[in-house]
Amino acid sequence: MDDLLADFIAETREMLEATGGELVAWEADPADRARLDAVFRFVHTVKGNCGFFDFPRLAALSHAAEDALADLRAGRREASAALVSAVLAIIDRIAAMVDAIEAGQDFGADDDAVLIAALGAEDAESDFAHDPAPLLPEQMLAKRGEPAPALAAPRTIRLPVELLDRVMSGVSDMVLARNDLAHRLRESGTQPTIDGPFERLTAILSDVRDAITRMRMQRIETLFGALPRLVRDLSAELGKQVLIDLEGGNVELDREMIETIRDPLTHIIRNAIDHGIEAPAARRAAGKREIGMLTLSAHQSGNTIAIVVSDDGRGLDEAKIAAKAIATGLITEAEGAAMSRDKILQLIFEPGFSTADSISNVSGRGVGLDVVRQNLEKVGGSIAVSSQPGVGTLFTLTIPLTLSIIAGLTVEVAGQRFAVPQGYIEEIIEADAARLDYAQMGERALITFRGERVPCLLLADVLGLPAPDMRIGTHTLALLRLASGDLFALCVERIHSHGDLVVKPLAPAVMKCGLYAGSALLDDGQPVLLLDVTRIAAEHGLLSEARSRTMRGAEKEARAQATHTARAMLFTAIDGRRAAIRLELVQRIETIPASAVDLSLAQPRAVIDGLILPLAGFGDAPLARPKLRLLRLSDGASELLYAVGDVEDAVELPAELTPVPGDPLVEGLMLQGGRPVAVLSGHALFAAHGRPAEPAERPACLLPDTEWARAILAPLVEEAGYQVVSEDSAKAPGAVSIMMEDLYEVASHLGQLPAGPVIRLRDHPDAPTGSPSIYRYDREGLAKALKAAAGGRA
Amino acid sequence: MSALVLMAQIAGRRCAMAAEDVRSVIDLGVIAPVPRAPAFIAGITALRSQTLTVIDCRLALGLEAASLYPTDTRAAVVATGGHSYALMVDAIEDIATSLGEPGHIPGGFGAEWQRAATGMIETGIGPALLLDLRPLIAGPLAGARTNRAAA
């Protein structure tokens, strides 16, 4: 709370400083709309913020000033000198109060009512006019600058971003200077007296560089962290029940960017709780859960970071928005009639727009949304809203990736390097035209990847550089998966290292090429351009609509059945040798803890999904790792597990394998990357180890006979190692039963409780005191109870 | 008015840039070309940890055949619109003091030069054309391209 308070004070101060100039200008020309808006925004924000803290006097003052300014904005009142003075006096008072709050003192003067009353005065003859003239901002600042003896020491320091930038670029320069020095040292041969300290310098520098980079970057978590509290307080104030769900907190953003979106996000959340989510009674009536859900998710997609805020409230009322927009003169009636629903919804971001019927203490007059959009657009972002009446509203904030750090890969083509965001890369393959099944269909090139025809772009073609002939030699292809799910191959000449890239914006003329998303510096100080993968794909028509995508999925399935080539799974065995096994035999790749493996018997075994399966591929190697990767093989009737070190890839099997006489476990050899790889004989494997799976002893669990239990509870119970049995099947002795609390009560009254242990579930999160029941979505509690029940039984 | 200007040769003509617009003069290192960018963008280069867009001033003025002129290994770094640029010229000559306001001459300087020039100034080492950096950096076809983007 102290942190929040410190933030509040710092923010109010900053705004006061920024508003200082506006105040003077507004005093000079009270009709100036832009100044008025700025002053209004200030008091509005103060009002909103002090709602979270218990500052009734601040809230009353700012609310009064806001009302008066709102009247001015709406044209219900003319600006008079008296009114301007009264507003300025209130702002001075706010500044003084904030000082007092920080010092932890009570604010003495108790004439707020006089200040508020002055707002109502119509002309210069008000009582207030006899009071000393309000302080001008300059004086105000001077007054604030006076050392207040009781002032608490600052807990944090705020640094100008420019300073951080300077430090950061200074360190980057140091790295470059180091690289230069390293180069020269290499040229002059080994010099032990210099090399030692130089190594140390290198290590220190890379530490400092890491730290500096992190200084600018912040996980979005830091922003999300304050939200649950905000939501809790707001919903309590408004008499609503709201749960917040946060996703993607690990997305990293430039610190400055986080600061930029902090207020917009807060505004949107306030709006969602105030206007979006209905009161519990209304929700019940609409057939929804009483508790409203507010979901925030952040994800990086391509060159932007999208933050989606969705609620399951009443949704936006298109007709009401249109009517309001017409009433406020934003659009004409004819325009409104011609606009699509989507267009109309976006009107809520227009300045001076609001749909709230009653003005509450929380989200006010919709001043937020136009400012929200303004702030986002300032940093090159955008905001859009979509909504379904009765179902909910979804705000999508997109912010550019500039200044963000992304993991990237550098590729080379025609002697030039370019960077590709790692997130797109599905796989990298190196093969010749025959293996790729390269085909030229008109202007479009296709390759075959895992039985699927994938469009292929030559990066050299895309960039207008001399392109290699695909039919000759081997090629390196990066398979890129777009956010839309489309896959395409990008042929490059070489792939270089990958690493974290600090993406910087490009000059407009370069951006206009439509190929690049930014630039980055490689470790050697060489600049590279970051490819805008999504745009390149779109330019070449590789971005599909959702509908055509599902169609293509069906086609793909049909084709996969039609072209049935033998394929094998390539892997590194536990002993480090590379081997392959026919793909048809591989059911799944599993990872199990070493504790699930039993090597004590002549035939090693492992437990997986409650089944005990024979384990092959182990040889004499000791069980060195905590987790084991396994191929789960099946011949249709029986299953076995094959331990592997690393799974590499699925490859096509040549028509004929080179036979290996004398080794019955190997079907033959194939060439892979110029080296022989043994293809294991499935026949020999299953002959030696295969047998139908023995079910591990799994305790039975009886579930309530409801849809919820079948769909939601059952997977959880099975995961805990139970076998779900239905009520009418033979009741296993000692089976654990899960019952809903109300049914349990009925059963216990009737004396028909099941014999085995019973786990009781309740509908409500809060337990009546002393109740042994578990809330039905308390996953952890449930898992614990299931474990305890299994232990008790054994 | 007397102000410092940076004197340079562009396409064999003497030009001047206001010294306060010029952040530094650097030795051009490796320039990474930008495929599919307009010709006047020679590429990008790194100035310490910053990325600079390298503008070939001859081509930015719409003058063909930049290869007819020598190119200085040094470039003037300027910043406008939040981005930094390195201006590639024939030669960077000197710093001089401009004497008096930029003036015009009858008949103008020729269409392309007119677009990118503020006017003629007199300096201690003779007359020079004072350049306006914004239109220069926007490139020769800037007008046409903006229109297309808007359409």
Image (cartoon, coloured by chain):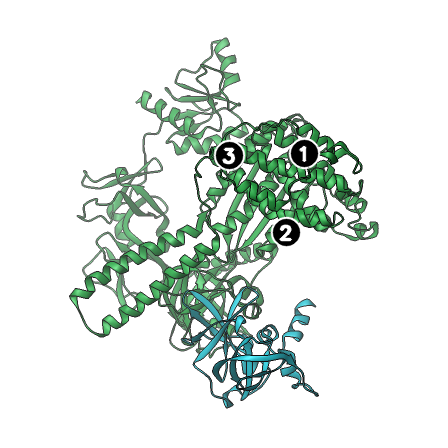
Chain colours: A green, B cyan
Question: Dot 2 falls on which chain?
Answer: A
Q: Position of residue A685 (x, y in %)?
A: 26, 50
For the residue pair A565 and A361, the one nearer the viewer reads as A361
**Sequence-wise, which precedes: disc 1 or disc 2?**
1
Residue A568 in sight here: no
Measured in 3D between alpha carbons, the distance from the residue under mark 1 to the one under mark 3, in whole angstroms, is 21 Å
Viewer-closest of A177 and A663 = A177
Q: Quadrant of residue A311?
A: top right
Q: As drawn, which residue projects farthest toward the bottom?
A: B68
Q: Secondary structure at mark 3?
A: helix
- SS under mark 1: helix
Count neighbours of disc 1 (C-alpha within 10 A) and say few if under 14, some if 14 to 19, many if 20 or more: many
For the residues marked 3 and 2, what is the alpha-carbon distance in whole angstroms?
A: 31 Å
Q: Spatial distance from mark 1 to mark 2, Cα to Cα? A: 23 Å
Give the residue pinned by disc 3: A102
Query: Residue A101 placed where, x, y %?
Result: 53, 32
Q: Which mark is residue A374?
A: 2
Which label's residue is closer to the chain start, 1 or 3? 1
* Image marks 1 and 3: residues in contact by CB distance under 8 Å: no
Residue A38 shows which numbered tag? none
Q: Looking at the image, which is closer to me, A316 or A566?
A: A316
Q: CB under 8 Å between callouts 3 and 2?
A: no
Query: Which residue shows up at 64% across the image and 73% down it?
Result: B145
The amino acid sitting under disc 3 is Glu
Q: Given the image, on which type of amino acid does mark 2 rest?
A: Gln
The residue where tag 1 is placed is A63
- Dots 1 and 2 on the same chain: yes
In front of the other: label 3 or label 2?
A: 3
- In this rendering, position of residue A405 left or right of residue B109: left
